[in-house]
Image (spheres, grey):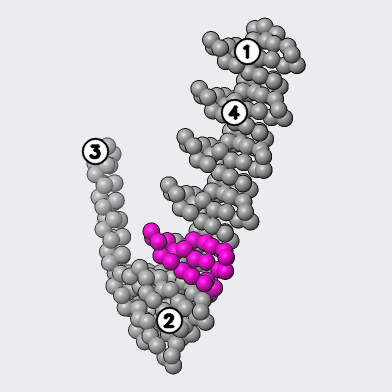
Amino acid sequence: MNRTFFIFICGCLMYAAMVQAQAQDGINARYYREIQIDAHDGKYGLLYHDKAIVPYVYDTIVAQKDNRVFITQKDGKYGITGLRIYYGDKKDGKKMFPYRNQKLYFFEKEGSGNRAKGIHICVEENPCEYNEIKFIDGRYWVSKGNQKGILNSDGDIILRCEYNEIEFIDGRYWVSKNNQKGILNSDGDIILRCEYNEIEFIDGRYWVSKGNQKGILNSEGDIILRCEYEEIKFIDGRYWVSKNNRKGILNSDGDIILRCEYDEIKFIDGRYWVSKNNRKGILNSDGDIILY
């Protein structure tokens, strides 16, 4: 097949798929708008064309995100109910919505039996278990007692409600749990576990401490220097460290240049001048012995 013609066909297929997806989004948006908050005997639920898809058990319901998410309130606690709507074949419902805690409804629009087409409404009704829910920068910040968590705009969990403190800084969550600190990415994946007393992000790396021990990890949470040093200084691209009152040098990747066995280390004219137990020596910049 001619390469130019092949590229043309692929482009046409991609465009058709995009147009179809946009059309589906337009159809779905219309059906979301048909969801209604309704009251009965002082309680609230959700209706689609006079059929209850969320029961009348809530004290209040507030629509969010164009009727795709609802904040529910019951007995002084808050919850989140999410809806997902898809227009398609009746038999496709379970394949489209394989979610936990779901209720799946089908409303026939055309055809009948297994060949029927219509809208699938998947309801994910989560219990009212939060003391507070705030919508900030596209996500729900929730709390249970003194514990905090984060949910995405559809009400799905990003961070479980188990942290004492949460801050969102430069695209990552800085958290604390049982007085220990950690870092998670924007999807809730762990970068640093909650096991550190202190964490600082300096020049693209995490400087951490456990008790009196210090270490360094890269931006993905991989260890550069294990948390076993009393002091760490980064000078001219190398780590100057001390351990058990002995000094050493490691390169920027954490590889040993001089082991932690010296009382003093000085770098003069491209060489290390060292002392150990009243004896002195000289090593080159790679840690090889010149005089000892």
Which of discs 3 and 1 lies nearer the camera? The answer is 1
Above or below 43: residue 137: above
Of 220 and 6, nearer the camera is 220
In the rendering, at what x and y percent does residue 81 appear? 45, 73
Q: CA distance from mark 2 to mark 3?
A: 59 Å
> Mark 1 or mark 4: which comes first in sequence?
4
Q: Quadrant of the N terminus?
A: top left
Q: Is residue 9 left or right of residue 183?
A: left
Q: Is residue 189 visible?
A: no
Q: Quadrant of the C terminus?
A: top right
Q: CA distance from mark 3 to mark 1?
A: 67 Å
Q: Is residue 48 left or right of residue 74?
A: left
CB contact under 8 Å: marks 3 and 1: no
Secondary structure beneath dot 4 equals loop
CB contact under 8 Å: marks 2 and 4: no
Tell me which residue sits at (62%, 46%) in the image: 196
Question: Mark 4 = which residue?
Answer: 254
Provide the residue span drawn in magenta.
124-151
Three-letter code for the amino acid on which mark 4 is drawn: Gly
Secondary structure beneath dot 2 equals strand
Three-letter code for the amino acid on which mark 1 is drawn: Trp
Magenta residue check for 223 = no
Question: Mark 1 = which residue?
Answer: 273
Question: Mark 2 = which residue?
Answer: 60
Which of discs 1 and 2 lies nearer the camera? The answer is 1
Above or below 213: residue 158: below
Question: Mark 3 = which residue?
Answer: 4
